[in-house]
Amino acid sequence: MEKVKILDKTFETFIGSDEIEKAVKTIASQMHKDLAGKDVVFVAILNGAFMFASDLFRSIDFPARITFLKMASYIGTSSSGSVKQLIGINEDLKDKTVVVIEDIVDTGITIDLIVRQLKTYDPSEVKVAALLLKPDALTKEVNLDYVGIKIPTRFIVGYGLDYNGFGRNLKEIYVLSENQE
Ligand code: IMP
Ligand code: MG
């Protein structure tokens, strides 16, 4: 088993390139069946989803647009103290089929926020594609239309996902070694 060290932690091989590629292709063909002919705008969530979005979008064989958004944390004056807001929307999403491209859904809190904020732009529908899902970690009832690979509740890096900013360039997905969790 191949191991990599990122900052202070050791990670080991978890999901290989072939499996990732297969999951991306499967999602692309499901999308072809559901979405071809619709007015589609893909919305990729930075930073983590950039690699998945790039591979997925290259596999899309119908006319569609793509744009990139980011969740920004604001330490605001709200009672909760911290407010997360989606930034970067300058496309017209009204009456479009919006397809969110997210790297991973863990508790579901982030994707729930993203979908709720996108709906305020009056799209005809909002669909969600997540490469990875940790089903046992979900705390929100979220509607995920396309899911690539389900994984146990463990910390992973690679293929766009990071540990403190590093590891995004790994071509495969690695999991934090058991004895370090
Ligand atoms: P959630 O709000 O708990 O669903 O978390 C989703 C976000 O947390 C994702 O968009 C990722 O940026 C990040 N995340 C969740 N799990 C992991 C992981 O295992 N590795 C790296 N980032 C993760
Ligand atoms: Mg993310």
Image (cartoon, rainbow, N blue to C red):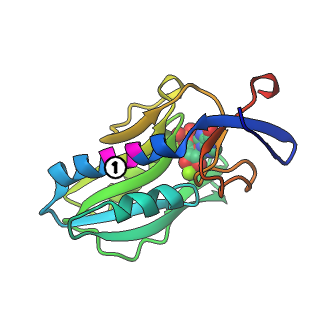
Task: Give residue 76's quadrant in the image.
Answer: bottom right
Q: Quadrant of the C terminus?
A: top right
Question: The magenta stretch spans which residues?
Answer: 22-26
Give the class, few, some or many, for how many residues have Cα within 10 Å of label 1's Cα (few <14, many ≥20): some
Q: Residue at x 18, y 55 (%)?
A: 35
Which residue carries the number 1 mark? 25
Q: x, y percentage for residue 68?
A: 46, 68
What kind of element bears circle 1?
helix
The furthest residue to the left = 37
From the viewer's side, name the closer residue of 94 and 12. 12
User: In this rendering, is residue 76 above or below 154?
Assistant: below
Is 100 on the left-hand or right-hand side of 159? left
From the viewer's side, name the closer residue of 37 and 121. 37
Q: Residue at x 37, y 47 (%)?
A: 129
Q: Main secondary structure of the magenta part?
A: helix
Task: Give residue 131's quadrant in the image.
Answer: top left
Q: Residue at x 52, y 59 (%)?
A: 51
From the viewer's side, name the closer residue of 14 and 181. 14
Q: Quadrant of the N terminus?
A: top right
From the viewer's side, name the closer residue of 151 and 101. 151
Q: x, y percentage for residue 143?
A: 33, 37
User: In this rendering, is residue 130 above or below 122?
Assistant: above
Q: x, y percentage for residue 160?
A: 59, 55
Q: Is residue 112 visible?
A: no
Q: x, y percentage for residue 120?
A: 33, 59
User: In this rendering, is residue 103 above or below 2?
Assistant: below
Residue 25, magenta (yes or no): yes
